Image (cartoon, helix red, strand yellow):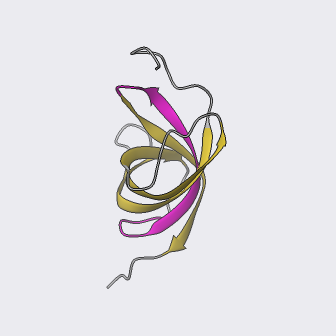
Amino acid sequence: MTPPGVPAAPNQSRVKAKVLSVAQSPNFADKWQFDLEILEAQARQGGAFVQAGQQIQGFTIAQTCAAAAGDTINATAEFLGDPRGGQLRLTDVSVVERQARC
């Protein structure tokens, strides 16, 4: 068991997730914050820090964000945090299914 306050070891997973919400950071123009529901997760390096069914926050650094609430995305994810909580740093984000828009 990891002692409280010890950060997650280097890790990387490939995830498929439903975007519950997405918003541009009020402090950084190139940071996008997500609320996600993990649909699939496959550990690639280090431990598996996320699993299907989990809801978690995440972020990506990009000039624009193509994903919107309701979309399904694939991404490479690194868990940043400790046993008390954390979030996912997302890279290589791609939309695989778009929510219908009016």
Above or below, 101 relative to 34: below
From the viewer's perspective, tell me whether residue 54 is left or right of residue 92: left
Q: Position of residue 10 (x, y in %)?
A: 62, 29
Q: Position of residue 102 (x, y in %)?
A: 31, 85
Toward the bottom, the furthest residue is 102
Toward the right, the furthest residue is 45
**What residue sits 49% from the left and 21% below the top?**
7
From the viewer's perspective, tell me whether residue 3 is left or right of residue 43: left
Name the chief secondary structure element in magenta.
Answer: strand
Q: How many marks?
A: 0
**What residue sits 38% from the left and 82% below the top?**
100
Residue 17 covered by magenta stretch: no
Residue 75 covered by magenta stretch: yes
Q: Is residue 84 visible?
A: yes
Q: Is residue 31 visible?
A: no
Toward the front, the furthest residue is 1
Q: Which residues are magenta?
A: 67-84
**What residue sits 40% from the left and 66% below the top?**
68
Q: Quadrant of residue 69?
A: bottom left
Above or below, 4 relative to 79: above
In the image shown, does 13 or 94 lie closer to the viewer?
13
**What residue sits 44% from the left and 45% below the top?**
58
Q: Position of residue 45 (x, y in %)?
A: 68, 38
In the image shown, does 66 or 37 lie closer to the viewer?
37
Q: Position of residue 80 (x, y in %)?
A: 49, 31
